[in-house]
Amino acid sequence: MLNLVDSTPPRLLIIDDDPLLRGMAANTLRHAGFDVSEAEDGIQGLEQVKQTPFDLLLLDVMMPKLDGYEVCKHVRQSPRGERVPILMLTGLHDSTSIEQAYEAGATDFISKPINWTLLSHRVRYSLRAGLAIESAMRSHERLERAQHIANMGSWELKADGERFLCSPELARVLAVPPEVVARARPEDFLSRIGSADRDTIRAMRQAALEEGRPYQRTFVIHRFDGVARTVFEQAAVVIDHNGRQVAVEGITQDITDRVEAEERIKRLAHYDVLTGLPNRQFFNELVGPTLDRSARLGAGCAMVYVDMDRFKSVNDAVGYAQGDTVLRLISARLKASIRTSDLAMETRPPNHESMLSRVGANAFTLLLVDIADEKQATLVADRLLKAIAEPIAIDEHELVLTASIGIALYPRDAADAEGLTRCAEQAAYAAKSAGRAQHRFFDEAMNVRASARLARESDLRHAITAGQLRLHYQAKVDAGTGRITGAEALVRWQHPDRGMVSPGEFIPLAEESGLILPLTDWVLEKACEDLRRRADMGLQLVPVSVNLSSPSFADDGLRTQLEALLRRHRLEPNSLVLEVTETLLMSDVERAVARLQELREMGFKVSLDDFGTGYSSLGYLKRFPIDELKIDRSFVTDVWRGGRDGAIAVSVIALGRVFGLQVVAEGVETRGQSTFLLAHGCAQQQGYLFAKPVSGSDFDALLATPSADDGSNIIVPKDD
Ligand code: C2E
Ligand code: CA
Ligand code: CA
């Protein structure tokens, strides 16, 4: 590219068959600072043009072989010669040859005889003009390229409002056929704009023409090939040097892809992918204005929280993919139920503004607008429950689902979307606790309970980290000999205000809140620490039983956690017994069996706690790889009276024998109970008769003191 500021002089080529004239011109121009080459005829000239890029050509018209016009045409057709300025040397006042020169593509002409003082000025001027054109062309090309990349095209609407100039780029963007481009009229384009915007755009263009008002707008246009696209259009007025409005100029950009991408992003941020329903956050945003409107109209709303019951078992039964299908189906039923007036037949239908959202894995919320009272909301809830309970056929399964529904009323229960949802959720929680498959209205007591619960939860969280937990031990004894055969580790909470809190109070809370995991970590750690200490003290080591809650048992990290514990405290796996309950194992039998197997292979003993209180069947018992059964206290209590519970205890003992399991009776409080159990073959006993749960150091003392001849510890039962 030529650059006049550049230090390299512009390169010129003079093609003239007249050596004298050529030489003089060359001399003059060299003198003026140009780099000049010469060619003595057209053929030589073209040859040189092919080899060297020149910044300007001086071309004589009259030459033998190839005349100047021909040379000019050839240069213009050559790849480099398209834009190079060509000055033609013509005879004076020879208007036909001048015309012919322009036709052949000449930039300008210089007439002979040549005015030598002016020559270099003419050349310089031409070069500068050429440069301007070149850069204009380049910027035009750049613009075209930019427009191409940006999927935009420009247009011009003439002041008469009749002619519409469509750029090639716009033609491409809108797939305009050439015949339309050739004589385009504004209506050709306006008629393709979606009806919603057509009149607006027409009016805006008119306003631009008449009042000089620029505009910009996004709208949908049907391209000439029929495809609908979203475009963004910006237009402004063209004013000539006299200050007159001569046209409206605009650019139209196809932004369909961007709009779609934005919509996708919006959908991802605002909607649940599975059901396409608004997510919790977006739902709250939507609900806000609706509540405000209802408040102004004095109308009531109801927030309904639908929590599917036992959905985990659906996933277990049909797999996650089909579980998702079920959720989509449920969401469709709920959606239909707020759309159809059928839902609340006996009452007014929920207002069309009512909306639905998926707020949790198995939970939905509905806002029912224009609901007057509890009675009306009850009708809706009943119908929702019915809709949910319609059987669902998945593969060969027929599922009948239920849900727990909580309802909060606006404005009675809360003043905003979030508060309302929270209340409804609490009510759903209450419905679930009350036995599922029913609805509950929110009441203040729930709120109090819920906040009390939250407070207790954070209290407990603090307890775990602040060292308020204690681990007590209750001896397990061979009733025949009085020897201590083991101990159960039982957690306590040394509460700064409430004193010693029993696990019955906080274990359920820990299980619901997930705090059971850190709590179990603490218990395991402490139990191993105590075992290590006893070993170091030279005390007799009896295995310690630790209670495992369901989340801990199911936790994938359990294996590594236990291995690390044993390594750290230098203990053998048989120093720990893991107590699990039937209900825990029954919630997912396959997984439980696999996990039990894993634990036993690692060398741990597993005990089935509270046996007889759950719903285990003998068939399952056979499948569970366990070592020990613990007869629940409730069967032990009046065992010696020979009642029904006694009979159960006896058969559990027999069962244990059949399966080769050790049987432990817990909650043994009297000699009578102990003797009866012993007589029926259950020597392993645990209960207040022998020892209450005591602190770690007290248990150490217990292990240290009364010893039998063989060095083991004997506990003498207390008198009844
Ligand atoms: P559990 O596993 O059935 O533990 C036996 C419970 O019976 C203990 O209550 C124990 O103190 C009590 N007990 C023992 N002998 C007698 C007796 O002769 N008469 C009577 N009336 N009760 C007796 P505790 O310590 O209050 O524990 C209650 C429950 O809390 C435990 O029942 C267990 O399910 C749970 N728990 C305790 N510690 C832990 C723990 O570290 N982790 C987990 N996950 N749960 C624990
Ligand atoms: Ca236990
Ligand atoms: Ca128990």
Image (tube, rainbow, N blue to C red):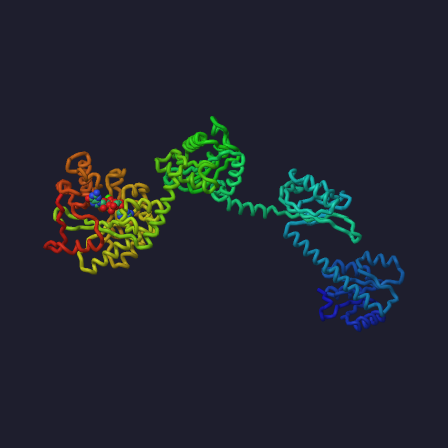
Camera-nearest residue between 405 and 160? 405
The answer to whether residue 498 is seen in the rendering is yes
**In the rendering, at what x and y percent does residue 683 appear?**
15, 45
Residue at 45% over, 42% down: 419
Q: How many marks?
A: 0
Camera-nearest residue between 60 and 525? 525
Q: Residue 181: name its quadrant.
A: top right
- Judged left or right of residue 33, residue 337 is left
**In the rendering, at what x and y percent does residue 536 appear?**
21, 60
Which quarter of the image is occupied by the C terminus?
top left
The answer to whether residue 666 is seen in the rendering is no
Camera-nearest residue between 640 and 141? 640
Which residue sits furthest front? 497
Residue at 15% over, 41% down: 673
Q: Is residue 665 above or below residue 350?
A: below
**In the rendering, at what x and y percent does residue 3 appear?**
72, 66
**In the rendering, at what x and y percent does residue 593 appear?**
29, 45
Which residue sits furthest top? 346
Which quarter of the image is occupied by the N terminus?
bottom right
Which residue sits furthest right? 93
Q: Can you tell me which quadrant of the image ligand 1 is in? A: top left
- Judged left or right of residue 116, residue 322 is left
